[in-house]
Image (cartoon, rainbow, N blue to C red):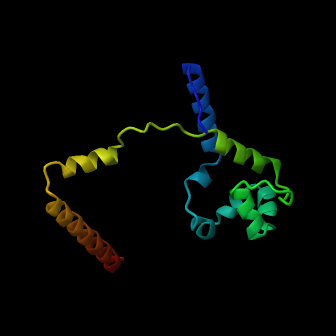
Amino acid sequence: MEINLKSKEEIQNHLKQCLKFIGEYKFLSESYIIQFFTEDLWSKLPESWQHSLNNLQPEDMKKIILEQNENSQPTLPLSFLAFKTLASRLPIIRDNGETPENNLQQIFKKNVNPKKQHEIQVLSQVCIHFLFSEIKLIS
């Protein structure tokens, strides 16, 4: 979905809507799937969502995620449908320019021949492996 924001007010309004949405569902956007089990994030979902999603079959969940509109789709809470709609209609527009990571990679590769780049990559992997093995020994 492409959004054309032309005026300063449109951009500010879009950002306010995005921030409101992100703030409301921050616990979802900043969590890993494993945290649903380890930190019981399931209980933080609205009760109506829990009840509806808990009774879904895997095939029904797939249809919802892939937005396959079929007659047999389960009835979902209006708040969940609003969440899905807002999530798809409030994308954060990103600049396709250079990211700091890409820029940093280019700086490190500048004036370094491919053989040396390979050696640096291998050595960094060895360092990471060693670091993690030492952390496991300490804890």
Say which residue appears at 75% left-offset and 68% top-offset. Answer: 59
- Count of numbered circles on the image: 0
- Hey, which quadrant is residue 76 in on the image? bottom right
Rendered location of residue 134, percent (x, y)? 28, 76
103 relative to 1 in the view: left or right:
left
Say which residue appears at 58% left-offset and 64% top-offset. Answer: 33
- Hey, which quadrant is residue 90 in on the image? top right
Rendered location of residue 3, percent (x, y)? 59, 32
- Hey, which quadrant is residue 54 in on the image? bottom right
Vertical placement of residue 78 versus 37, above or below: above
Vertical placement of residue 126 versus 67, above or below: below
Rendered location of residue 24, percent (x, y)? 65, 44
Rendered location of residue 45, percent (x, y)? 71, 57
Q: Nearer the viewer, residue 113 or 37?
A: 113
Say which residue appears at 73% left-offset and 69% top-offset. Answer: 58
77 relative to 4 in the view: left or right:
right
Vertical placement of residue 12 versus 56, above or below: above
119 relative to 83 in the view: left or right:
left
Say which residue appears at 58% left-offset and 52% top-offset. Answer: 29
> Looking at the rendering, in which quadrant would you find the C terminus?
bottom left
Taking the view exactly as shown, the residue that stands out farthest to the bottom is 137
> Looking at the rendering, in which quadrant would you find the N terminus?
top right
